[in-house]
Image (spheres, grey):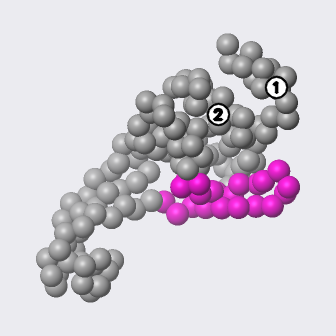
């Protein structure tokens, strides 16, 4: 690991801790050259593919999912930490399966299931983009399901 301050490659680990989700290790490191301390995060690199509705495949991108959740929760009292917990929970569920791919439809349903538990407005916002409602009737059907 290179020091972000001086760029030297020789660093040492000062402290390691498992994150709450148990799939990330947080490490405090110290540069052996300039003594600068910084934090790194280690995550299992076992790629999950998302199969889009047009059949193309993309690598699962937690940042892309976080941006979608942040858009759905704008002006709602939902902490980014909670959104990361949702993504961690989804990632744990996906990795516990033996398959290495998930459809975008399945992934969207996993997000909606978790959003419904924490905020109904965020659920509807996410669903309106994810389900691509064509008219008011489809929107009302989704609202009825939520009740």
Mark 1, Cα crowd under 10 Å, few <14 / some 14-19 / many 20+, is: few
Task: Judge from the rendering whether residue 89 lies leftward or rightward of residue 14; answer left or right.
Answer: right
Q: Secondary structure at mark 1?
A: helix
Q: Quadrant of the N terminus?
A: bottom left
Say whether residue 114 is magenta: no
Compare marks 2 and 1 and give the one earlier in the sequence.
2
Query: Which residue lies under the disc numbered 2?
Result: 125
Place of residue 125 in the rendered image (x, y in percent of width and height, measured from the top left): 64, 33
Look at the image and tell me whether residue 91 can be seen.
no
Look at the image and tell me whether residue 111 can be seen.
yes
Place of residue 97 in the rendered image (x, y in percent of width and height, measured from the top left): 64, 45
Magenta segment: 44-64
Cβ–Cβ below 8 Å for labels 2 and 1?
no
Query: Which residue lies under the disc numbered 1?
Result: 136
Q: Nearer the viewer, residue 37 or 43?
A: 37
Task: Judge from the rendering whether residue 23 lies leftward or rightward of residue 45; answer left or right.
Answer: left
Residue at x-position 32% and y-position 80% = 2
Task: Judge from the rendering whether residue 103 lies leftward or rightward of residue 73; answer left or right.
Answer: right
For marks 2 and 1, give the one nearer the viewer: 1
Total labels drawn: 2
Q: Nearer the viewer, residue 113 or 80?
A: 80
Residue 16, quarter of picture: bottom left
Q: Residue furthest top?
A: 147
């Amino acid at each position: 690991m290179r020091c972000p301050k001086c760029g030297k490659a020789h660093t040492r680990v000062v402290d390691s801790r498992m994150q709450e989700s148990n799939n990330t290790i947080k490490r405090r490191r110290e540069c052996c050259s300039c003594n600068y301390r910084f934090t790194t995060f280690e995550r299992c690199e076992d790629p999950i593919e998302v199969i889009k509705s047009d059949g193309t495949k993309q690598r699962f991108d937690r940042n892309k999912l976080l941006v979608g959740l942040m858009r759905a929760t704008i002006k709602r009292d939902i902490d980014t930490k909670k959104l990361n917990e949702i993504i961690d929970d989804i990632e744990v569920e996906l990795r516990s399966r033996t398959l290495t791919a998930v459809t975008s439809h399945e992934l969207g349903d996993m997000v909606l299931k978790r959003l419904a538990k924490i905020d109904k407005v965020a659920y509807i916002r996410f669903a309106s983009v994810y389900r691509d409602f064509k008219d008011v009737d489809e929107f009302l059907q989704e609202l009825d399901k939520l009740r």
